[in-house]
Amino acid sequence: MTRRLLSGDYPRSRMLATLLLLILAGLAFAPFAFPGTRSLDVAAKVCVFILLVASYDLLLGYTGIVSFAHTMFFGIGAYGIAIAATRLGPTWGSLVLGSLVALACSALLSLLIGMLSLRVKTIFFAMITLAVASFFAILASQLSGFTGGEDGLTYKLPQLLLPGTKLLEAPLFGVEINGRIVSYYIVFFTAAALFLALLRVVNSPFGRVLQAIRENDFRAEAIGYRSVIYRSVANCVAALAASAAGILYALWLRYAGPDTTLSFDIMIDILLMVVIGGMGTMYGAVVGATLFVIAQTYLQDLMKLASDAAAGIPLLPDLVHPDRWLLWLGILFILSVYRFPAGIVGKLRGRQ
Amino acid sequence: MSEPRSGEHPVLETHGLTIRFGGHVAVNQVSCAFRPDTLTAIVGPNGAGKTTYFNLISGQLRPTGGRVTLYGEDITALPASQRTRRGIGRAFQLTNLFPQLSVLENVRLAVQSHAGMGLNLFSVWSGHVELIERAEHYLHRVKLTERRDTLASALAHGDQRKLELAILLALDPDLFMFDEPTAGMSVDEVPVILELIHEIKSQGDKTILLVEHKMDVVSSLADRIIVLHQGELVADGEPATVIASPIVQQAYLGLAGHE
Ligand SMILES: Nc1ncnc2c1ncn2[C@@H]1O[C@H](COP(=O)(O)OP(=O)(O)O)[C@@H](O)[C@H]1O
Ligand SMILES: [Mg+2]
């Protein structure tokens, strides 16, 4: 059972297995273990980013493709639901339609980019994806009648998903079971299922070919694998998963805008998460996304506490001022890459 | 199992095959046909264009002129991967492996390609036990069984050459192309390789091209020798005749020429 679920790809480190189980338990019971709007927001964001980062790992870690268009596919998913809900009203039908259209667009666009440009060198492919993604971001902000421009779109969702909808008369374990909890579990279970599907893909015969192409594409061709086709399929699968993550995120936020999905900052966050967690491991996405999102959210709080506590001491309050959080995150990042070049997962596995 | 088919239609033909690198013509108007159940040795001094001729046949390079046909069908425009799928198998002169993958995985990938399973996205690779067993069989044939879990990059040079051959065997091609398979191997390793080529030859229906420098090897294995010199095909025939011909004595064996 576990073997089939994990596609035979075990954590291969007791520490890592423990860490993954803790994260799984934390996310599965988040509404009860960490009640409160903010912590549930963090948990949902972790779920979405685990899926998003795992799909990026399929590209970068397993196939050796450097793409900057991942947030574009993330955005296509989010805007797909947002536009459908805005235009067609808050019904399940419009959500399904919006999702399907978004997924179809992502599949087509990713295959097109792949077929046209995956023959070229890695660096040129990276440049092309950067150009396409920038163009798409500009397009989204220009077509403001449709996309809400810089302000983005805020919309209603079906009744079942709204915070005011109570499902149970009495609270369960002291928590009121409302539409937000339903939304959270839709996000959690979909993200978990799709993560396991990606884990299957990288451990399939196809996934093994991707690693061979990353190692030596000349030789992979010579034993009969047409690398442009394999790269394009990988690109398409990753784009579909990123769009699914976008759909879940838009479902959770009830908002889609440039800074929640399309911005280049998010692309950088994804890169950091995949590297911190450990490239080419899938489990790295789980660890990387969890730590990063939590740090992103709570580092500022922590620094505010430290800054207040250090009041009166020269220089120190300034250094730990919450506005410097990105600086500290950067330092943490450099230290972690320097200390664990194979990421946290690589480090934990290496100790065995 | 099958009767000699030397008289049958050629498996592979090159027609006026030519490639230019800038001003330098590396392969020049080479026309030649290769029939089943025949081992053809290709000889010629370093830089004669033997490896380049191989690259044109197996699809790593596109010619500037001429055509390649497989079973009479023009494959000049096909990429290397599709030529492999159609039965052309190539071992490389400079060892060319998947360095960070295990020895077994290097071979298993070739078995998987031959089984046409590369685009299977939803099964677990390790569940396809039959592919793993076949890969193990080929490793056994080149006597690399003990190294199955080693990374390819950690193998000694001679073992890397053997792995190269195991990958070729795993592709189960109709046309085998060996480019100096024993180069750089120690004396006691060479017989393993020659024995292997001999086994393939005795299957009786395979077409084999062999680039080899060691004349004793060539004369013991080859049914036919062709000589390349400065990109041109300059001699073609029975081993004894070709080896004795003045052009080989002069061009290949490097004996002082009579002007
Ligand atoms: N990709 C290439 N670009 C430029 N010149 C090449 C290339 N490949 C081979 N050559 C040249 O073609 C000639 C034939 O080389 P090669 O086929 O490797 O000879 P051989 O295998 O007979 O020793 C050499 O002069 C070599 O320098
Ligand atoms: Mg050569």
Image (tube, coloured by chain):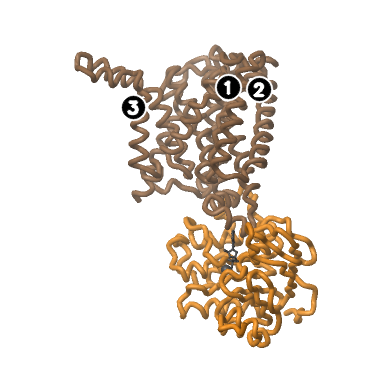
Chain colours: A brown, B orange
Can residue B212 be seen in the rendering of this structure?
yes
Residue at image x 56%, y 36%? A127
Separation of residues labelled 2 and 3 (CA atoms): 40 Å
Separation of residues labelled 2 and 1 (CA atoms): 9 Å
Q: Measured from the top left, where is residue B164 in percent x and y?
A: 54, 66
The mark that comes first in sequence, 2 or 1, is 2
Q: Secondary structure at mark 3?
A: helix
Q: Measured from the top left, where is residue A143 in percent x and y?
A: 65, 17
Q: Which mark is residue A148?
A: none
Residue at image x 56%, y 60%? B108
Q: Can you identify the residue that label 3 sits on?
A: A328
Q: Which mark is residue A251?
A: 1
User: Up-down: is B255 above or below A312?
Assistant: below
Residue at image x 38%, y 41%? A344
Q: Look at the numbered discs 2 and 3 and tell me whether their residues touch, using CB distance below 8 Å.
A: no
Please, what is the three-letter code of the amino acid marked with disc 3?
Trp
Q: Look at the numbered discs 2 and 1 and tell me whether their residues touch, using CB distance below 8 Å.
A: yes
Q: Measured from the top left, where is residue B100 in percent x and y?
A: 47, 55
Pointer 2 local density, CA inside 10 Å: few below 14, some 14–19, many at least 20: many
Q: Can you identify the residue that label 2 sits on?
A: A95
Pointer 3 local density, CA inside 10 Å: few below 14, some 14–19, many at least 20: some
Q: Mark 1 belongs to which subunit? A: A
Pointer 1 local density, CA inside 10 Å: few below 14, some 14–19, many at least 20: many
Q: Nearer the viewer, mark 1 or mark 3?
A: 3
Q: Mark 3 belongs to which subunit? A: A
Q: Secondary structure at mark 2?
A: helix
